Amino acid sequence: MRRRIASLVRDAEGATIVEFALILPVLMVTLMGLFDLSYNMYTSQMLQGAIQNAARSSTIEGASGDQAGIDGIVTRAVHAISPAATLQFDRRAYASFADVARPEDFTDVNGNGSCDNGEPFEDVNANGSWDADRAAAGFGGARDAVLYSVTVNYPRPFPIAKFIPGQTSDFTLRTQTVLRNQPYGAQEKGAPSMGNCS
């Protein structure tokens, strides 16, 4: 009996299958994570290229009349990779690159750092209220700097969310570029109107 027990202890047949069964789940999650990361990086690069191409098309005179066609360039490029993706587009026009994402100027009478209590401000985008971003919506005019943003949401091609905590079943990319419109006319730079903060 002791001999049989000793031979069973030394017997290594089938150990490889058991070891592989222990390693397989970790290996599969690692591979899916790498594939997911690679897919997301590839999609990001394709989106960046498509948005650059569309943004260049947006800078010419008369481009605002073909917004659907310009956005279609980006949509087709993304749908070639991820057919179920949803896209959101945003365009903001500024008088210059230095104005991108800058708030409208105001006089901080009470010194609290915010535009309130009837303090005067320059209404650069002519919408009647003070804004933390002085942009005007749309393509802008001649020589304007336009910030073109695209947000893409698509389902992950690999079920990585089931295995890694904190991951979602969808992935969201946001890409943006800023280009200056061609000088096809005089820049519409009137003096900004004045308003009062509420």
Image (cartoon, rainbow, N blue to C red):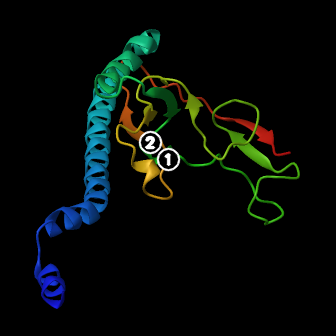
Helix, strand or loop at label 2? It is strand
For the residues bearing labels 2 and 1, Cβ distance under 8 angstroms: yes
Foreground of the two, 175 or 180: 175
Rendered residue at 30%/24% (across/down): 77
Rendered residue at 71%/30% (across/down): 127
- The residue under label 2 is 171
Helix, strand or loop at label 1? It is loop
Dot 2 surroundings within 10 Å: few (below 14), some, or many (20 or more)? some
Rendered residue at 38%/12% (across/down): 69
Q: Which image quarter: residue 176?
A: top left
Foreground of the two, 85 or 93: 85
Indicate which label's residue lies in the foreground, 2 or 1. 1
Rendered residue at 30%/32% (across/down): 52
Q: Looking at the image, can residue 183 be seen?
A: no
Distance from Cα at disc 2 to Cα at disc 1: 7 Å
Q: Quadrant of the N terminus?
A: bottom left
Q: Which image quarter: residue 180?
A: top left
Which residue, as the protein is rendered here, is positioned at the far right? Answer: 117
Q: Looking at the image, can residue 96 be seen?
A: yes
Is 147 positioned to the left or the right of 56 in the image? right
> Does residue 102 sit above or below 150 in this rendering?
below
- In the rendering, at what x and y percent does residue 166 appear? 51, 57
Is 111 positioned to the left or the right of 117 in the image? left
Q: Amino acid at mark 1?
A: Thr
Is 29 positioned to the left or the right of 15 in the image? right
Which residue, as the protein is rendered here, is positioned at the far bottom? Answer: 2
Q: Check residue 81 in the rendering and tell me which mark sits there, or answer none.
A: none
- In the rendering, at what x and y percent does residue 117 appear? 88, 52
> Does residue 101 sit above or below 112 in this rendering?
above
Is 100 positioned to the left or the right of 105 in the image? left
- In the rendering, at what x and y percent does residue 109 appear? 81, 60
Q: Check residue 168 in the rendering and tell me which mark sits there, or answer none.
A: 1
